[in-house]
């Protein structure tokens, strides 16, 4: 008999910001605090802009709509500050973006897929371990259309 290891996905429950710190409370009772300097958009945002956020992906990430900032809980746990914007633009062509609707389970990565989410979605840049992958995206990728 073998024992399988289950990967638990950390989920955010609440978010607080101060002038210099972002603190996220997790469903399992942990609290993560990181310096706002890691996230220049948040650092330069007004108190009102920082206060307007929503949890995305069932708590896997946080989105601030007024400043167009998205932060994943997994990234916070890894201690990963935001990448500089110019590097993101240079690297963007080589990065596959996996998207899942906020209230869906299927992951999409081909922008030509008829189900590819364009709003209210959660993003990952690595292949997600949980949830099914889209059959249409897989077919388009195999055919070289993505």
Image: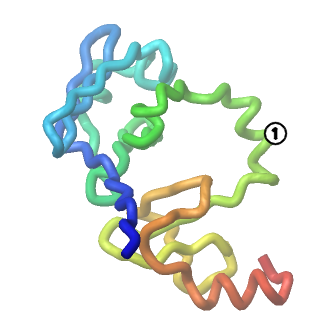
User: Outermost residue, right direction?
Assistant: 144
Q: Is residue 144 above or below residue 15?
A: below
Residue at 42 percent of width and 32 percent of height = 76
Instruction: Estimate the x, y position of residue 121 in percent, counting from the top left.
Output: 43, 63
Residue at 31 percent of width and 29 percent of height = 49
How busy is the neighbourhood of tag 1: few (under 14 within 10 Å), some, or many (20 plus)?
Answer: few
Residue at the disc numbered 1: 90
Image quarter where the N terminus lies is: bottom left
Q: Is residue 2 left or right of residue 144?
A: left
Q: Secondary structure at mark 1?
A: helix
User: Outermost residue, top direction?
Assistant: 20
Q: Is residue 113 left or right of residue 94?
A: left
Q: Is residue 35 above or below residue 112?
A: above
Image quarter where the C terminus lies is: bottom right
Instruction: Estimate the x, y position of residue 77 in percent, counting from the top left.
Output: 40, 33
Q: Quadrant of residue 22?
A: top left
Q: Quadrant of residue 34?
A: top left
Q: Nearer the viewer, residue 115 or 142?
A: 142
Q: Is residue 79 above or below residue 28?
A: above
Q: Nearer the viewer, residue 19 or 125?
A: 125
Instruction: Estimate the x, y position of residue 70 in percent, counting from the top left.
Output: 45, 42
Residue at 30 percent of width and 20 percent of height = 33
Residue at 53 percent of width and 83 percent of height = 115
- Number of numbered markers: 1
Instruction: Estimate the x, y position of residue 116 in percent, counting from the top left.
Output: 55, 76
């Amino acid at each position: 008999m073998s024992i399988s290891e289950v990967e638990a996905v950390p989920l955010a429950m609440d978010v607080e910001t101060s002038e210099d710190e972002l603190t996220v409370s997790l469903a399992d009772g942990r609290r993560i605090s990181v310096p706002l300097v890691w996230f220049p958009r948040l650092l330069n945002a007004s108190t009102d802009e920082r206060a307007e956020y929503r949890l995305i992906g069932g708590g896997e990430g946080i989105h601030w709509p007024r400043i167009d900032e998205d932060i994943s809980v997994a990234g916070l746990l890894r201690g990963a500050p935001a990448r500089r914007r110019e590097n993101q633009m240079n690297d963007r062509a080589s990065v596959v973006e996996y998207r899942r609707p906020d209230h869906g389970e299927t992951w999409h990565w081909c922008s030509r897929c008829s189900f590819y989410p364009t709003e209210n979605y959660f993003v990952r840049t690595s292949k997600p371990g949980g949830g099914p992958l889209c059959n249409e995206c897989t077919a388009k990728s195999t055919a070289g259309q993505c």
